[in-house]
């Protein structure tokens, strides 16, 4: 049986070295044991945050004002349309490719499948993914009613895509004879109060 007190200075130094190595390996083992757990958690947390619904208090949006929020990495337009803008949606219909959103390529929840493409409880509020249905650029808003260099003589306001010239009205409905062939998408949404909207969640209404 060995006796620690009888060890030479060399034996004691060797023992201290071996003890240190053992502790070090134990610590590495603990980290290695934890790391896979952290790594397996990270993507799902990221995915959860990326897909999480976004809420917005639209009481600060005056009639005619628009804001963009980000949902799932995409810009989503919220536009509080004026009565004049709503009237313009009817006037422009002969120039549109799919005014009733009947084409299956037009994506919107059932409650937004109407000419205004909005929930009937807040018809003036447009909620729309600002992503061109041609090749995915983000169209520029053209909110003024009247002649516009890009939107044309009879513009009732809309969105113009600078990439290849597609045009959409103030409900995201695509014009005829432009590169894009379908209306811009409407995401699922619901209202959590009279003034707060939740984008990305509609409590199964769609
Ligand atoms: S991406 Fe919009 S017109 Fe081509």
Image (cartoon, grey):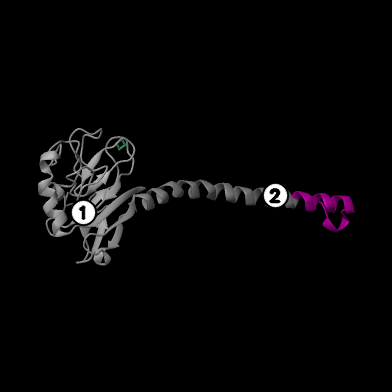
- Can I make out residue 52 in this image? no
In this picture, is 33 found above or below 61? above
Give the numbered dot on residue 88. Answer: none
- Please indicate whether residue 131 sits to the left or right of residue 108 in the image: right
- Please indicate whether residue 29 sits to the left or right of residue 22 in the image: left
> Majority secondary structure of the magenta segment?
helix
Residue at 53%, 50% in the rendered image: 34
In this picture, is 125 found above or below 113? below
11 is within the stretch colored magenta: yes
Real-space Cα separation, disc 1 to disc 2, in angstroms: 65 Å
> Which residues are drawn in magenta?
1-18
Mark 1 CB within 8 Å of ligand 1: no
Residue indicated by mark 1: 126
Residue indicated by mark 2: 22
- Can I make out residue 75 in this image? yes
Q: Could you tell me residue 73's position as x and y percent?
A: 36, 48
Q: Could you tell me residue 170's position as x and y percent?
A: 20, 49
Whichever of labels 1 and 2 marks the residue nearer the N terminus, that label is 2
- Please indicate whether residue 116 sits to the left or right of residue 62 in the image: left
In this picture, is 167 found above or below 88? above
Q: Nearer the viewer, residue 16 or 124?
A: 124
12 is within the stretch colored magenta: yes
């Amino acid at each position: 049986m060995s006796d620690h007190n009888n060890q030479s200075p060399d034996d004691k130094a060797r023992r201290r070295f071996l003890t240190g190595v053992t502790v070090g390996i134990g610590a590495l083992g603990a980290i290695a044991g934890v790391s896979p757990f952290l790594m397996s958690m990270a993507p799902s947390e990221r995915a959860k945050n990326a897909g999480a619904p976004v809420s917005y208090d639209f009481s600060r949006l005056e009639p005619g004002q628009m804001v963009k929020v980000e949902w799932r990495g995409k810009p989503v337009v919220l536009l509080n349309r004026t009565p004049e803008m709503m009237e313009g949606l009817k006037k422009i219909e002969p120039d549109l490719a799919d005014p009733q959103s009947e084409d299956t390529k037009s994506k919107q929840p059932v409650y937004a499948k109407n000419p205004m493409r909005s929930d009937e409880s807040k018809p003036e509020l447009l909620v729309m993914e600002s992503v061109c249905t041609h090749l995915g650029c983000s169209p520029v808003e053209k909110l003024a009613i009247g002649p516009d260099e890009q939107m044309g003589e009879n513009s009732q306001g809309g969105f113009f895509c600078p990439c290849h010239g597609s045009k959409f009205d103030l409900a995201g409905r695509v014009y005829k004879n432009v590169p894009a062939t379908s209306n811009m998408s409407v995401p699922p949404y619901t209202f959590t109060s009279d003034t707060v909207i939740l984008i990305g969640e509609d409590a199964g209404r769609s």
